[in-house]
Image: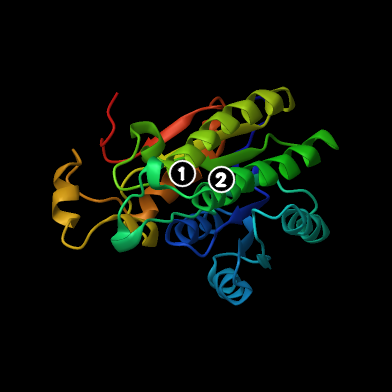
Amino acid sequence: MAGFDDQQWRGSALVTGACGGIGAAVARRLSADGWRLAVTDLDLERAQSLAASLAGEGHIALRCDVSDEASVAAVFHEIEAHFGKAEGLVTAAGVLRLGPGGQRTGIADMDVADFDEHMAVNSRGTFLCLRAWLRQWRDGARPHGGRAVTFASVAAQLGGYRSSASYIASKGAVMALTKAAAREIAPMGATVNAVAPGLIDAPMLRLSLAPGQEEAASAAIPLGRIGMPEDVAGAVAFLMSADAAYMTGGVLDVNGGYRMQ
């Protein structure tokens, strides 16, 4: 892409779910790479603490419920007031609910409310953030190509094990939405890709991993270990960089070889 300079290109970016285990690692990595970030969480104080700890200057913290249209709109309004328009977007906000004892709830036993919550946060939340981001591109071209990174999951690729069907379906929707968004924004020189984490040592994994199962889980991974949030952050940083200028509509696996094709 002509004129695409990695240092010049980095500007402002929104990271949703930034106070989660993976989201915080992503925020730390992107700030170290030179991005000015708007970090969001349902808990504003946690987001403020994270923003204050990041490398560089000019970061802001905002409360956001990604499942709520008005909340997402307010966040993008604040970003525009502080930064202008956001060149980058990382939709790390997500939820995983399990049944009693941390067990997967079967489809036959699943409540509609369970399904709806996963779709509202993981799928609709990604849609609302992508829509707001795409609208700002439609309303005025940026000087450099933009980057959006969404969060899929190895569970959606494999049908999951302990993850419920509602979570799996919500992440499958994210993968499809990523491709649709990538195709729509490509003429404007921006890219949209997804990362699909496998077993990552973060709070969400602890919900789905039974006590004492860590050793067995590690043994099932070709690289012999559960991943770290920083492993995912590195993949996100790549997709947000100039080096990924010719990648769009893709899903980057971060799973230690757990799902080899």
Residue type, label 1? Ser
Q: Secondary structure at mark 1?
A: helix
Question: Percent position (x, y) of residue 45?
Answer: 60, 77
Instruction: Check if mark 1's residue and mark 2's residue have beta carbons within 8 Å.
Output: yes
**Residue 119 numbered mark, or none:** 2
Going 53% across and 58% down the picture, which residue do you hit? 27
Residue type, label 2? Met
Q: Residues within 10 Å of mark 2 (few under 14, many from 20)?
A: many
Q: Secondary structure at mark 2?
A: helix
Query: Is residue 134 or residue 5 the one in the foreground?
Result: 134
Query: Is residue 229 or residue 127 the one in the foreground?
Result: 127
For label 1, the residue is 166
Question: Percent position (x, y) of residue 96?
Answer: 44, 54
Position of 120 compared to 188: left or right? left
Residue extending farthest to the front is 108
Going 39% across and 47% down the picture, which residue do you hit? 109
